Amino acid sequence: MDEKFPNFKEQSQKQSFNIDDKDSELLQNVLSEFSLHQECWRQVSTCLAQVDVLLSFTVSVDAANGPTCRPIFTSSCDGLSKGGILKIEQLWHPFALKAESSGVFV
């Protein structure tokens, strides 16, 4: 088995998990297969992180007590950056207005 992956049966005994030989072998095979597609999973992770940010924007807009706008994603101007740029102007914190009106410091 690949040296990058420890013997899971041995590790599980140290951590008081009960993994038999069959489960240990299966786990090693799954992790080995997973590592073969590391770049693909990295891209999936990046994509999910971007979706998470956009969903957070949506939640902030729903909770906002003032005007909001949509973010504008633009291409890199200098050609040196990988990916797009998020440019935000005249930004205010969604809870700042609420805190200011209630006198509560956030």
Image (tube, grey):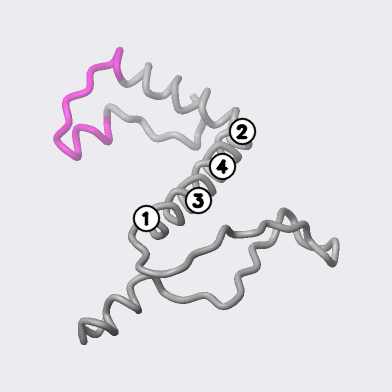
Q: CA distance from mark 3 to mark 1?
A: 13 Å
Which badge, 2 or 3, is on the more N-terminal residue?
A: 2
> Is 100 in the magenta?
no
Q: Where is mark 3, residue-wise? A: 54
The secondary structure type at the circle numbered 1 is: helix
Which badge, 1 or 2, is on the more N-terminal residue?
A: 2
Q: Where is mark 4, residue-wise? A: 47
In percent of width and height, residue 53 lies at 48, 53
- The three-letter code of the residue at mark 1 reads Asp
- The three-letter code of the residue at mark 3 reads Leu
Which mark, by number, is residue 62? 1
In percent of width and height, residue 104 lies at 20, 83
Residue beneath the point at 59% across and 59% down: 71
- Assess whether mark 2 and mark 4 are in contact (beta carbons under 8 angstroms): no
Residue segment shown in magenta: 10-23
Q: Which residue is outermost to the right? A: 79
The secondary structure type at the circle numbered 4 is: helix
Q: Where is mark 2, residue-wise? A: 40
Mark 3 or mark 4, whichever is nearer to me: 3
Which badge, 3 or 4, is on the more N-terminal residue?
A: 4
Which badge, 1 or 4, is on the more N-terminal residue?
A: 4
In percent of width and height, residue 84 lies at 71, 56
Residue beneath the point at 33% across and 72% down: 95
| 91 shown above or below 35 | below
Q: CA distance from mark 4 to mark 2?
A: 11 Å
Q: CA distance from mark 1 to mark 4?
A: 23 Å
Q: Is residue 17 left or right of residue 92?
A: left
The secondary structure type at the circle numbered 3 is: helix
Label 3 crowd bin: few (<14), some (14–19), many (20+), radius 10 Å = few
